């Protein structure tokens, strides 16, 4: 992008995972977009007051705070902006709440820049939907549970606490193994 070119859109990325936010900002910048990051709601509110953003990408959970508060603020301040709630804890009630507050999209992690740009309508994939491999919700849930289980060193009790799940329920899910797609 040259100095005289305007960026395609201005993004604010709010995620308590600084590495994820910085990588996403870099990926968006390399595609001609301008991106700023924040790791807490206070920094996000300050950025919203200081600049006009076209797109907000926020995590559902930011530390002990809710990204949904930010969705409502963005919708009030910039009603024509696009808002994407990106989360590793996707659920139907959370998605419904996010949309009611003004989110245009709700996407489960992991998601890359190309997928985000596509869902927000900035790009289109060349692949037809019929050719794409769709992942079942059960398989997505299993992959999330497995990743948390691996991250805790295969500690069932700790994994169950992190997932807010009863330990025996987790043991049964792990014993069943990976569901078929």
Image (cartoon, rainbow, N blue to C red):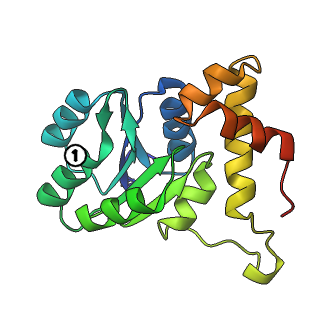
For residue 9, what is the image quadrant?
A: bottom left
Q: In this picture, is 157 found above or below 32?
A: above
Percent of width and height locating residue 19: 54, 25
Counting labels gives: 1
- Of residues 167 and 71, the one drawn nearer to the viewer in this rendering: 167
Horizontally, residue 34 falls left or right of residue 71, namely right
Residue under the point 77% across and 41% down:
172
Horizontally, residue 120 falls left or right of residue 148, namely left
| Quadrant of the frame with the C terminus | bottom right
Provide the residue designation for mark 1.
Answer: 69
Residue under the point 30% across and 57% down:
54
SS class of the residue under badge 1? helix
Of all residues shown, which one is farthest toward the front? Answer: 168
Percent of width and height locating residue 88: 54, 43
Q: In this picture, is 160 found above or below 74?
A: above
For residue 139, what is the image quadrant?
A: bottom right
Residue under the point 31% across and 43% down:
67
Q: Is residue 14 visible?
A: no
Q: Residues within 10 Å of mark 1 (few under 14, many from 20)?
A: few
């Amino acid at each position: 992008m040259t100095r005289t070119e305007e960026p395609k859109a201005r993004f604010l990325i709010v995620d308590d995972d600084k590495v994820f936010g910085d990588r996403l900002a870099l990926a968006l910048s390399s595609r001609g977009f301008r991106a700023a990051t924040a790791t807490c709601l206070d920094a996000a509110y300050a950025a919203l007051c200081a600049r006009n953003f076209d797109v907000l990408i926020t995590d559902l959970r930011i530390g002990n705070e809710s990204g949904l508060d930010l969705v409502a603020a963005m919708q009030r301040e910039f009603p024509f902006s696009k808002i994407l709630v990106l989360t590793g804890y996707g659920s139907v009630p959370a998605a419904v709440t996010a949309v009611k507050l003004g989110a245009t999209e709700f996407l489960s992690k992991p998601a890359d820049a190309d997928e985000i740009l596509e869902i927000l309508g900035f790009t289109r994939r060349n692949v037809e939907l019929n050719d794409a491999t769709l992942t079942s919700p059960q398989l997505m849930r299993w992959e999330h549970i497995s990743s948390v289980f691996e991250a805790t060193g295969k500690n069932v009790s700790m994994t169950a606490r992190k997932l807010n799940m009863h330990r025996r329920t987790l043991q049964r899910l792990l014993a069943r193994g990976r569901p078929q797609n």
